[in-house]
Image: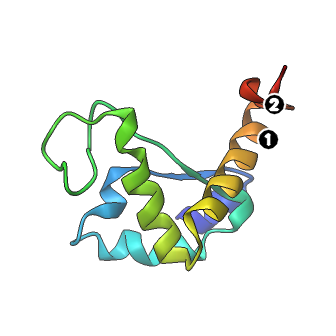
Amino acid sequence: MAEQAVQLGMYISFAGPVTFLNARQLHAVVPRISAERILIETDSPYLAPHPYRGQRNEPSFLTWTARRVADLRGLALDDLAEITTANAMRLFGISEPSWASP
């Protein structure tokens, strides 16, 4: 289903459940999504990543999701951050991140 969504021009975003040990099907999907169509999100306040599973999710927990997605794709965390930042900017029509402006 994710591959069909990508073919339609959609993005696929991964949240806390990708860190769950029993999410094997989700783990298999991550490396199959084109780098140009992948995003990460918190889904806050729900679905906190492992090791916070069952607790209220917080934006600061996004690094757990990012690390897991990077690992599943065989990427360094910084590389995944560049990819997902560029994708979010393209999706939302942002030409330059606000923190980069003088």
Counting labels gives 2
Name the residue beneath numbered marker 2: 93
Residue 8 visible in this rendered orientation of the protein = yes
- Alpha-carbon neighbours of circle 1 within 10 Å: few (<14), some, or many (≥20)? few
Q: Is residue 87 above or below residue 30?
A: above
Q: Residue at x 47, y 43 (%)?
A: 41
Report the side of 89 relative to 18 (left or right): right
Q: Hey, which quadrant is residue 27 in on the image?
A: bottom left
Where residue 68 appears, x then y in whole percent?
41, 66
Q: Residue at x 21, y 72 (%)?
A: 22
Between 74 and 33, the one lying in front of the other is: 74
Q: Secondary structure at mark 1?
A: helix
Where residue 2 appears, x then y in whole percent?
55, 63
Are dots 1 and 2 in contact, CB under 8 Å?
yes
Residue 7 visible in this rendered orientation of the protein = no
Badge number at residue 90: 1
Q: Quadrant of the C terminus?
A: top right
Q: Hey, which quadrant is residue 92 in on the image?
A: top right
Q: Is residue 85 above or below residue 26?
A: above
Report the side of 33 relative to 52 (left or right): right
Report the side of 40 relative to 18 (left or right): right
Where residue 9 appears, x then y in whole percent?
74, 52
Task: Spot the residue most to the front.
Answer: 102
- Alpha-carbon neighbours of circle 2 within 10 Å: few (<14), some, or many (≥20)? few
